Each structure stands twice: as C-alpha cells, then as structure tokens.
Image (cartoon, rainbow, N blue to C red):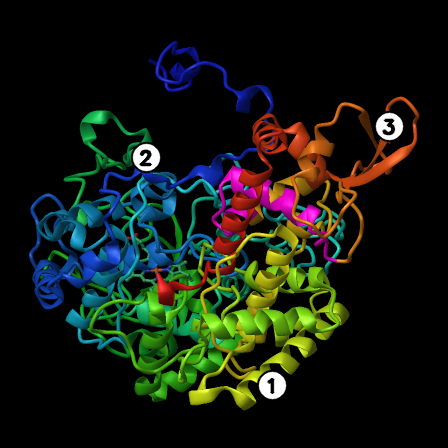
Amino acid sequence: MAASECPVKKANIGGGGTRNRDWWPNDLRLNILRQHTGVTNPQNKEFEYAAAFKSLDYDAIKKDLTDLMTNSQEWWPADHGHYGGLFIRMAWHSAGTYRVTDGRGGGGEGQQRFAPLNSWPDNVSLDKARRLLWPIKQKYGSKISWADLYLLTGNVALESMGCPTFGFAGGRADTYEADESVYWGGETTWLGNDIRYDSGREGPRGGGGGVVDGDEGPKKDHADIHSRNLEAPLAAAHMGLIYVNPEGPDGIPDPVASARDIRTTFGRMAMNDEETAALIVGGHTFGKTHGAASSDNIGPEPNAAPLHQQGFGWKNKHGSGKGPDTITSGLEVIWTSEPNKWTNKYLEYLYKYEWELTKSPAGANQWVAKTDDEIIPDAFDPNKKHKPRMLTSDLALRFDPTYEKITRRWLDHPDELHDAFTRAWFKLLHRDMGPRSRWLGPEIPKEVLIWEDPVPDVDHPLINDTDITELKKEILATDVEPTKFIRAAWASASTFRGGDKRGGANGARIRLDPQINWKVNNPSDLKSVLSALEGVQKKFNGSAPGGKKVSLADLIVLGGVAALEKASGLPVPFTPGRTDASQEQTDAQSFTHLEPVVDGFRNYGVGTNRVRTEAFIVDKAHQLTLSAPQLTTLIGGLRALNANWDGSSYGILTKQPGKLTNDFFVELLDMSTEWTPTDGSEEFFEGKDRKSGSKKWTATRTDLIIGHHPELRAVAEVYAAADAEEKFKKDFIAAWDKVMNLDRFDVR
Ligand code: HEB
C-alpha cells in the first residue's frame, strides 16, 4: 500500500472510520482528562511504585549499568568503546522536554518510549539506547520504572566517565500510553516552525483578564532569527526538536543568533544563562555526533517503520548502518580528544582555535578548527585522527557576550564548571518531580535547592480533632463572609499542576509574592481573609498546650473546610500538617508561571481568538488531575457557593448563593430559560425566561459549555436529577478534598 493512502479511515473494524475529530476538529476534547487511568496500566491496582523502588538493589543496578557502558554490542557498537555519550543524550532528551511555562513534558513519565517522542527527528538512535537497557530493565522488573532508568543511566554514565554527580532521586512511575496533554506545536511537518514563530504568539502571560497568546502583537517575520518570539508554552525552536537547531536558527550558521534561540528555549526549561552554558559545555564534553553520510540513507522513524523492525526506526542503508557508518543528526563532530572522560577540553578547544564553517559528510553546517592539529581520535579506527570540530550552537557559548563571560571563567576554573554542571544536570533531571517528599533512594542530596519550592519540616505537635473543631468555630466567628474562605482555599490549593507537581496549598505561598498580588486572587479580599486567619492563628499558637501549632497553610484550607461544612451541612475532611514557606524559600519569578490567565473554576478571564475560553477549563482540570465528572461537579458547586473570583454573578444560577446545592445544573438544564450572547465574541450570555422574556441569569462560556458539550451535559444531567442532590454534595466535597490535598505527597 502506498504510504499516502490512509488505511485507518477506510478500516471498518478496530476503531477505523471517520471520527468526531474529523467531522468537528474544533470540538472541545476531554480525552486528556481520562489518560493514565487504571485500564491502560498493566500493574496490579495495589502496585505502588515507591514501595517497589524501595526494594530495588540500588548498588547492584548501578554496577550493572556501569558494566553496560563498556559492554559494546555487535548490533550497535559503542563509539570509542563507551556508551556514555549516547546514554547522556538519552537522559537529556528525556528530561529536556520539560517546560516551566505549563509544567508539562519532562522525564517523569517514561514518555520517550511512546510517540511522538520515540519518533522525533531529534531522538534518532535513542531507540537503540533504550534497547541496550532492556536486559537491565528485564532483570529488575517493576522495581525500577523506565522513567527512572533512563535518567539514572545518564547519571551513571557521567560517573563512569569520571564526573561525580550531585545525586539522584528515583520516584517516577511509568505511564503506559502517550501523553496527549502536551502541546508540542501546531506544525504538521517535522522540523517545521511556521506556527510557533508566527506573529508574536508568545504574548503576555499572567496579565490577568485573559490574553495568553493573542495574535495582537506586532506581526513578526518568522524568518527573522534575531527578533522572533517563540509561542508559549513551547520550549523548542522546531517541531520534533528538544531545543534548538544545532546548525543555527533555521539552519543559518550564525552563533550569536543561535545564542538567542538557546537562551529562549533553555529559559523555558527554567534554566538561567549559567545553568544553560554549564549543561551544554558539560554535555558536549562527552561523546560524538553522527553524520557519516546523507540522511537520505535512513528509513522511517519507529512509529512509521515496518512491523518486523519491532520498534526500531531509522534503518540505515549506508555501509554497515552502524558504528562508523551511523547517521543520527547528520552532523559529524567529536568535541574533545578524550570523549569518554570528564575534562575541560571542550572549553580549551572552543577558545584555543578559530573556527571555519564547513560541511559534514551529510551536508550539514558545522565548524572545524583552523589548525593542522589532528588530535581527535576516531571512534572506531585507531589509525585515524581528526581536527577539533564544533556545532554552531557550541560556538554560541563563545560568541554571545554573556555566555562568553561565563564560559571564560570556567576555562580557568574547571572546578566551578563541575559544580555548575552537576547542579544544573541534577535540576534538569529532577525539576518536574515536585517536592522532596516524592524523592526516593540513597543518593538524595542533603542540600535543599530553591527550585524544589521547599517547605519547612513540621517541628511541632499537630492540631488534633478537638483543636480542629475549635478552630473552625473561631474562623466562622470572624467577620469575614464564609464564601471568602472558600475562595481563598481554592485560590491557594488550585495552583497545583500535575505536570511538575508544583504549587498547591502547602507552604501558604498564596500570602507571598507573587501570588498575593495575582489579579485572579482578588488581592484586597484575599488580604482581609488572610489577616482574619492570622488573628485566629496567633490566638491559637499563643495559648495551645504542649507546643501545638497551626500553620497558616493549614488554616487557609481549614477556612474553606469550615465554610463548606456550613454551606453543605455535611462533614468535610481535613488533614493537618502543612507548613508555611518563607519568601526566601520562594523563587518568585518561577512562580509567575503558575498564575492562571484564564480560570473557569473562578470564572476568570476569557480566551483568545485562537484558544476558546472553554479549552482553558479542560487544561486547568488536567493540571488538577481531575476527571470530566469532577470538573463538572466542581464548576456546579463553586457557582452554587458564589465563589467567582470577583464575586460577580456570572453563572451563579441559584436563588440561594452560598449554599451547596445542585441548583446550577437544575437551572442550566431548565428548558424555560433561553440563552443569548451579550457580546460580539460570545463570551458572556444572558438567560431569559422564554415566555415572559424577563432576564433570569447571566453566564460565561465556561458555564454554558456544561450544557453544550454532550459529554459534560450527560454528567450535568446526573447531578440535576431529582435523586441527586445528596450525591452531588458528596461528590463535590470529595473533589474539593482532592484538590486541597493534591500536593500532600507527605501523607500519601
Ligand atoms: Fe547535545 C550529541 C545538539 C545540548 C549532551 N547534541 C548531540 C548531537 C547534536 C546535539 C546535534 C549529535 C547527535 C548525534 O548522535 O548525531 N545538544 C545539541 C544542541 C544543544 C545540545 C543543539 C542545545 C544547544 N547536549 C546538550 C545538552 C546536553 C547534551 C544540554 C547534556 C547536558 N549531546 C550530548 C551528548 C551527546 C550529544 C552527551 C553525544 C551523544 C553520543 O555520543 O552519542
């Protein structure tokens, strides 16, 4: 069958045929809310990865990995007799998809074994790296996940080449299907970048009120490599690359422009200039690039390759197709004369030589030292030597003035490079793991790092049930309207994002910069709530027997619990044990990425002409790890509780706001109401009585999507039914409790 024919649409079994996505490409999709549920996971329900990892013989697996480094296999021979470079690249490409903008990507799920990542043009030959690991994975089974194994292997590779690391933590449970929640870009061709650089989509973030990546900015020529802006939340310059084009922006060998792309993309990965330079210098101290011949020699990527290749892709018909004939990036560079050793030679050569533009055997732009020094050993032929070579992106570290300052210092202070590299490498591998309470294994560094978003340990007895009852009374006895406690608790806990497990109520960072001033948090109201809670805290902590204390973080959640119990007439669970972080423990800049620009749970903000408002509620629900029913329950309940960010009446479809009822669903599905838009972009609506024409309600797109989307409406119907009031309340409380405790890895 010709590759251009699409057999799937013609198939009449196995899920073939024309699908909803084909008919209505713009339909709101809820699929990301049902990923990684039990049915895709072959492990038993009771399986707990943390427990399994604790039974791993850590020293034994590290020894096996060390042995593997130099155990060259006939089917994929090791360059210079050592797989270290290949494995470092595997680990870096696994973790390096992380972006701080939305917390997605990264090495936390073992996603490199699924499409699209397994088939990205930047991941050529990593299919071989992962297979080299199979005997070790097979030996240790479920005691180590692929996710942990990829990264641990990179760490062991460094150590085996004389680069002691900063440490390692396990704890990344595998997923068993492709993660569809990550926006990798809108382009439909590999290595395309026409959408991500189109018309300044980077846009303002965190401005409040809505615009995320609007097309408002001045129209930019996407080809202008000196000024273009990369669309948020992306962190790569091309579809299918981890970061930047090694040949220079769009293939143009301009080291300074390359530095600009590097700064943007590594910045999106949460790396500053020093961390970025350290990673590249340290990484390219090892290994080689592969471009023995034209890329025309390689076959389709794993996902498009014939079935008999069993997951291998990029079959190479040049020569032996491996070893000296390998084609990966199409570039042919070995950076140092000792590519299996931690040395300072990358920087020594970078500065010692002047560089001349040349082409790899595959025809790609790269640089060669202007010298007769043939000092680089060939990877396979002991009789061959090469001149030093570099990529355009390597020269960026010398020709960009800021990177130059940093890298020249390391030229004279290799110990500082080692410290910077190993710290940045540790951050790269662990940035998306969330709090230290999730970290496992014997190699966890003692030093606490700011990017962990640390919270203090509990150093005092916790409040008990009697105290909790008493404190709830005290909270409700303040002169703050109960709904405001609900809003504050929600504002505090709902910053959590499942992607990198940052945010959440622990730490009470809502009282710190920048969260205290986020528009979505309604700062003036929030401050009055916090000062009331501080009053309660002061009184309790000043007089509680036995040194008992309550944190503000706990009180913020408890305020919501107290108000919700009052509003529902039902008990609401509460688990104490949160502590209060200080401003010094908080990287304020890094927290700006957690600011919601549109938050449908609080009816805050509107979408753009590219992203409709309702897509944001699905995105937010995904960050909160909610299912579609939980999303629906929470919207209905929060509206009933009158919890809009600014106290507005949009979507408050009830005569008794502040009480937990299923009124929102009942009214939304009531056929006597007719809805019409009140603005041109159809963001706001009013509901009139069909007969009398009298105005009953106002609502937003987020409210009305519940009645429009067939699957959300199906859930709403369950909650609007006459027999559902009690079920609704219980489901709401359960979903609420889930959100309040999303970051409580310490008690899970
Ligand atoms: Fe790299 C390799 C690019 C960063 C580490 N890299 C490589 C290559 C290329 C590149 C093209 C080749 C591939 C083949 O094989 O062919 N990089 C690049 C870029 C960047 C980078 C563009 C940004 C700027 N790296 C990096 C980092 C790291 C690294 C960050 C870590 C840390 N790499 C690496 C290694 C290697 C590479 C180790 C080698 C591999 C082997 O040996 O195999």
Confirm or deny contact between disc 1 and disc 3 (CB under 8 A).
Answer: no
* In this rendering, the label closer to the viewer, 2 or 3: 3
Closer to the N terminus: mark 2 or mark 3? 2
In terms of depth relative to the viewer, which is nearer, 394 or 584?
584
Q: Amino acid at mark 1?
A: Lys
Which residue bears the numbered disc 1? 539
| Percent x, y of residue 297 | 28, 35
Left/right of residue 495 with respect to residue 379 in the rendered view: right
* Residue assigned mark 2: 39
Residue 372: % across, % down? 27, 70
The answer to whether residue 228 is above or below residue 405 is above
Q: CA distance from mark 2 to mark 3?
A: 45 Å
The quadrant where ligand 1 appears is bottom left
Q: In the drawing, what numbered circle is on residue 689?
A: 3
Which residue type carries mark 3?
Answer: Asp
Residue 719 on image: x %, y %: 59, 34
Q: Which residues are magenta?
A: 621-645
> Which residue occupies the foreground of this view, 726 or 135?
726
- From the image, which quarter does the C terminus lie in? bottom left
Residue 232 coordinates in the image, percent (x, y): 59, 53
Q: Main secondary structure of the magenta part?
A: helix
Looking at the figure, which quarter contains the N terminus?
top left
Q: Is residue 338 left or right of residue 473?
A: left
- Label 1 and label 3: CA atoms lie apart by 51 Å
Mark 2 or 1, nearer chain start: 2
> In the image shown, does 631 or 678 lie closer to the viewer?
631
